Image (cartoon, rainbow, N blue to C red):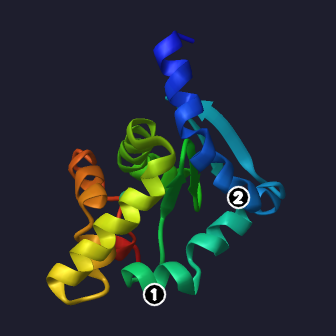
Amino acid sequence: MPLALGFRVLWALPVSVLALPLLPLALWRGHWRATGGALEITSPALSWFLRGVWFRWLAGGNGFAAATIGQVIIARDADCLTRCRAHELAHVRQCLRWGPLFPFAYIAAGLYAAWRARAFQAYYWDNAFEREARAAEEGSQCEARSLS
Ligand SMILES: [Zn+2]
């Protein structure tokens, strides 16, 4: 691992460890794969978590197909992972850039977007980090809103 990349992994580590509380959800029938600078995990319990009211409240629709915490990508299943990989890897790059400041930058960008739009769901949809990740999707449709 090149030194610069090693440093960035350490820089992002305080955010990546925030995925640890999800570990119990990732064990039963979990599929784990380390690839492309991220740890990708799917499991039935993570699928349940991603459909949770907390994500439906945040973004509308029926929750998230996938989500990224530092360098950990969780997804409902392999199809969601494939469809969302470009989007989620954009978030991984954002975290490698911002390191431990990333959660604060993301929240600030979301609050600013919601304040500008005077609508809470703009927190997610108009968040600058989400817009950048959607731009990276290259035609693949990741957003939960597109799921039925
Ligand atoms: Zn996103």
Confirm if mark 2 falls within 8 A of ligand 1: no
Q: Residue 1's image quarter?
A: top right
The quadrant in which the C terminus is found is bottom left
Frontmost residue, 29 versus 4: 4
Whether residue 139 can be seen here: yes
Q: What residue is disc 2 on?
A: 43
User: Which amino acid, mark 2?
Assistant: Ser
Query: Quick check: which quadrant has ligand 1?
Result: bottom left
Residue 10: image location, x then y, percent = 59, 30
Helix, strand or loop for disc 1: helix
Residue at (32%, 70%) from the top-left corner?
Answer: 110
Question: Which comes sooner in the sequence, label 1 or label 2?
Answer: 2
Against 7, residue 39 (above or below) is: below
Q: Amino acid at mark 1?
A: Trp
Task: Between label 1 and label 2, give the one nearer the viewer.
Answer: 1
Q: Residue 117, position in %: x, y? A: 16, 83
Rendered residue at 66%/74% (across/down): 48
Number of the label disc, if any, that sits on residue 83: none
Percent coordinates x, y for residue 126 in the rendering: 22, 70
Q: Is residue 123 left or right of residue 126?
A: right
Residue plotted at (34% across, 76% down): 145
Task: Identify the residue at image location x=65%, y=36%.
Answer: 33
- The answer for how far apart the CA atoms under marks 1 and 2 are is 22 Å
Residue at image mark 1: 57
Q: Is residue 79 left or right of residue 125?
A: right
Task: Determine crowd level at label 2: few under 14, some 14-19, many 20+ residues with C-alpha closer than 10 A.
Answer: many
- Give the residue at the far left of this rendering: 116
6 in relation to 52, above or below = above
How packed mark 1 is, by other alpha carbons closer than 10 Å (few <14, some 14-19, many 20 or more), is few
Residue 85, image quadrant: top left
Tell whether 148 sits left or right of 81. Answer: left
User: Total marks drawn?
Assistant: 2
